[in-house]
Image: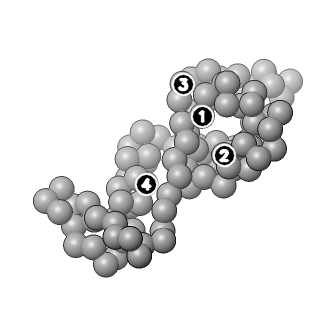
Amino acid sequence: MSQTKILDIKIDKITTEEVLEKIKGFLLSDKNSPPDKRGWGFRNAEDKSQHHIITLNPEMVVEARKNDYFKKIINEASLVVADSNLIPSSAPTIFK
């Protein structure tokens, strides 16, 4: 999975199918839990492997430019995807 940065904020370059596979992997990351009928594992209280998924929108990009702590939270997330075509389509304009 590759990443790009827009205004120093990371965004994962990933297809919808890859997002679903990645999330499935997150759900199955607890090796101590048996999968249910759907193939998903259940987390227990001792499991420390948590994942943070962000669907980034333009308002969040604006806030992250002003708020370093918010930017840090975004950049440390397990998965950051754009919630619309607005962010990826604006990237060439930002870097002109």
Where's residue 51, x and y in %?
50, 57
Position of residue 44 relative to residue 55, above or below, is below
Taking 39 as reference, is 74 above or below it? above
Check contact, mark 4 vs mark 3: CB within 8 A. no
At mark 4, the secondary structure is: helix
The residue lying at 83 percent from left, 28 percent from top is 95
Q: Kindly identify which residue carries mark 3.
A: 84
Q: Which color scheme is applied?
A: one colour
Residue with the mark numbered 4: 22
| Precedes in sequence: disc 4 or disc 2 | 4
What kind of element bears circle 2? helix
Question: Which mark is on residue 74?
Answer: 2
The disc placed on residue 56 is 1
Whichever of labels 3 and 1 marks the residue nearer the N terminus, that label is: 1
Quick check: marks 3 and 1 in contact, CB under 8 Å?
no
For marks 4 and 2, give the CA distance. 17 Å
Secondary element type, mark 1: strand
